[in-house]
Image (cartoon, rainbow, N blue to C red):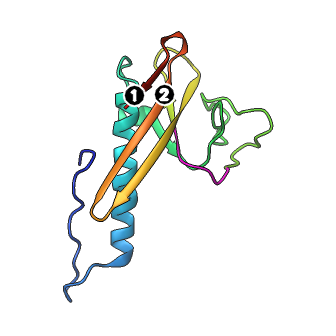
Amino acid sequence: MAEGDSLPEQHDAGGYRDPAMWKAAEFMAGRFAAKEAAIKAHHQLKITFQDIEIVSGTPARGFKDGAEDSPVQTEPGVGEGSLSSGPPTAIVRLPTSSQGQSALLSISHDGEYASAVCLAVHGDQGIFNA
């Protein structure tokens, strides 16, 4: 499903939408759109869906998921595994470095559609928007 693709209709035997199934489909469609946007924002890298983690909260310089070998460094003052209640963030594991890079995300849902925008900063190259 690409950005802007319609979510499939989920009906049970009674002909109405299962709310739990619909909520899960919306969530997955939003995360899929976010990963696509992150790949486009990092177009110069050879990254895949497995290189991107979408997390809730917005640590400015990274996120530590609690794993000892996590490639992403925690921002000073942010506890291990702690999350803020801000917008989602894409954590991109760079193939050329042991460090990860965070990128800002906006995920939107409108009826049967999910879309996402990713804003990534690439050192001296400036800001790219996907």
Q: Which residue is mark 1?
A: 41
Give, as a single range, the part of the protein colored magenta: 84-90
Percent across and percent down for residue 61 are 65, 30
Q: State the residue in front, 23 or 4.
A: 4
Give the residue pinned by disc 2: 120
Residue 127 placement, left or right of 11:
right
How many C-alpha atoms fall within 10 Å of the one at disc 2: few (<14), some, or many (≥20)?
many
Which type of secondary structure does the marked residue at label 2 adopt? strand
Residue at the location (63% across, 30% down)?
A: 69
In screen coordinates, is 123 left or right of 49? right
| Residue 109: image location, x then y, percent | 37, 58
Measured from the top left, where is residue 102 in percent x and y? 55, 32
Q: Secondary structure at mark 1?
A: helix
Identify which residue, 104 or 70, lies in the foreground.
Answer: 104
- Is 8 contained in the magenta span? no
Above or below, 22 against 67 in this view is: below
Q: Is residue 119 left or right of residue 21?
A: right
Does the magenta portion include 85? Answer: yes
Q: Residue at x 41, y 34 (%)?
A: 38
Do the numbered discs 1 and 2 sit on residues whose CB atoms are within 8 Å? Answer: yes
Give the camera-side residue of 22 and 130.
130
